[in-house]
Image (cartoon, coloured by chain):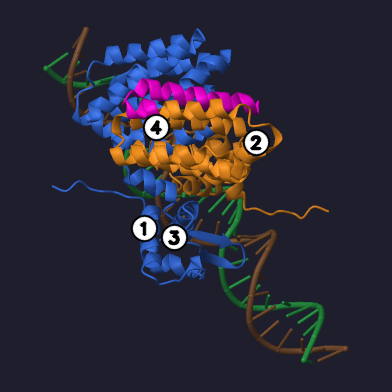
Chain colours: A orange, B blue, C green, D brown
DNA sequence: TATCACAACACCTCAGACAAGTTGAGGAGT
DNA sequence: ACTCCTCAACTTGTCTGAGGTGTTGTGATA
């Protein structure tokens, strides 16, 4: 027998409204129907609707102005980031990684310091030894890519990359275990080319190399 | 003369409660006095206290359990991600936005459905009326850009974009207030070109238009 | 001592009333 | 024809009173 999950109506109403907001029923800045309209529509009393609205207002999603109405101010504050990533398809995550990393590569080409370039080259060297085992190889690869993102001097991009790692790492390890490393030398040279483009301060080329490499990786997972 | 700042009692009550919680009047996990006690103490009605509590519950500070009471669950939870974004320079955030949105534009060109294309065009139309006020214009613009990200059919990218909005929106409004809209018609045509590229399923062109537009925006902020 | 019934108390929900702010239509005056 | 003003019809804000449901500690009972 299913345990009766009793949730306050106000919470349910808030969840329902949030769903409709995220579904695009009301765009950003748009006005919601009045409380007196919403209440019978949701099958609850007006005060309950008000409490649901207050709840979403506390989360920054809604804002109400007396006399004018209730307005959408955001489409949900960052939902638990971990949850989103865990649920997301690995290909989806890689696509996001492509977005972050190609841009980071371009910025890194413009902003990298000599010291960072040196660190990149060292990371590249330790990356090229897959004999140490799959996990070590993946870790070395991740460390290399992180060097590049760091060199972009953009805290947000770095933070995003770090957020991806926990989801990416196991997937990479699985992939390498199942599928042969498919031409490691070529793969390694792609990385070397990327570093050289950054060294030459050629941001377009760096972005292109980064994209090519990661797209190949994505294809390999499809 | 000071502008009469009329704030809803519920908001004031929430602020007051949050202050007392932060002041350590009730420790983490402790139970607050009942609504019937709090109401006369704050000089407001019971429903107003309830709305204040709901608001704080939405922020994750309080949690109420029927029959048991209201408990402190956090001392104002500044989620890590929020902190990063709030602290980050707006230019840094825009650079991250460029990464997300150009990739999203390219993917949207490949994956958009006819319905989504229609929604894009409608959002573009409502976007083109800056007479409605700065805030409305920014909201319409955000809604337009979100349509494109949505059409990329990548949940992670969408989530990232949504995460940026709360930081981006006020910055955009400030910028438009301080600096004249600088050639709105051109700006609007750039958006139209982007939509057409997506309509034509030309992902390279879409990415290029997106990047050009956002880079101009970034320059304008520097 | 261990168990159980129960009363007190908590939050949950509703309905109704009135206050106060906002907006747009339409009339008065120029 | 245009501007300004009034006002009615919205909207959200607040309070009150009533009854419902879940929780917890107390005290009687075995």
Determine whether A178 is above or below A56 in the image. above
Q: Identify the disc placed on residue A176.
A: 2
Write down the chain letter for disc 3.
B
Asked if the residues shown at circle 4 and circle 1 are in contact, with their CB atoms under 8 angstroms apart, the answer is no
Mark 3 or 4: in front is 4
Circle 4 residue:
A104
Q: Nearer the viewer, mark 1 or mark 2?
A: 2
Discs 4/1, front = 4
Q: Which residue is mark 3?
A: B45
Q: Would you say residue B27 is visible in this rendering?
A: yes
Residue B69 as seen in the image, left or right of residue B53: right
Q: CA distance from mark 1 to mark 3?
A: 16 Å
Callout 3 secondary element? loop
Q: Residue at x 63, y 27 (%)?
A: A182
In the rendered image, residue A101, in percent from the top left (x then y), is placed at 44, 31
Which region shows up in magenta?
Answer: A196-222
Mark 1 chain: B
Is residue A22 covered in magenta?
no
Report the chain holding disc 4. A
Q: Viewer-proximal residue, A93 or D20?
A: A93
Q: Is residue D14 left or right of residue A87?
A: left
Q: Earlier in the sequence, mark 1 or mark 3?
A: 1
Kindly report the distance in space between the C-alpha atoms of the residues bearing marks 3 and 2: 63 Å
């Amino acid at each position: 027998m299913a345990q009766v999950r009793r949730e306050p109506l106000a919470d349910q109403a808030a969840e329902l409204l949030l769903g409709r907001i995220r579904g695009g029923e009301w765009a950003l800045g748009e006005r919601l129907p009045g409380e007196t309209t919403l209440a019978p529509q949701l099958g609850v009393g007006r005060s309950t609707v008000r409490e649901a609205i207050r709840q979403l207002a506390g989360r920054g999603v809604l804002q109400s102005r007396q006399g004018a109405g209730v307005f959408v101010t955001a489409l949900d504050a960052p939902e638990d980031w971990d949850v989103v990533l865990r649920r997301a398809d690995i290909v989806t995550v890689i696509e996001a990684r492509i977005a972050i990393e190609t841009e980071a590569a371009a910025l890194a080409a413009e902003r990298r310091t000599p010291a960072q370039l040196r660190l990149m080259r060292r990371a590249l060297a330790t990356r090229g030894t897959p004999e140490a085992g799959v996990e070590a190889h993946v870790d070395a690869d991740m460390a290399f890519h992180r060097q590049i993102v760091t060199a972009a001097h953009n805290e947000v991009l770095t933070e995003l990359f770090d957020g991806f790692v926990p989801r990416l790492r196991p997937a990479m390890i699985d992939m390498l275990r199942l599928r042969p490393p498919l031409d490691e030398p070529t793969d390694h040279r792609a990385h070397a080319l990327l570093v050289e483009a950054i060294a030459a301060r050629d941001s377009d080329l760096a972005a292109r190399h980064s994209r090519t490499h990661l797209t190949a990786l994505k294809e390999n997972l499809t």
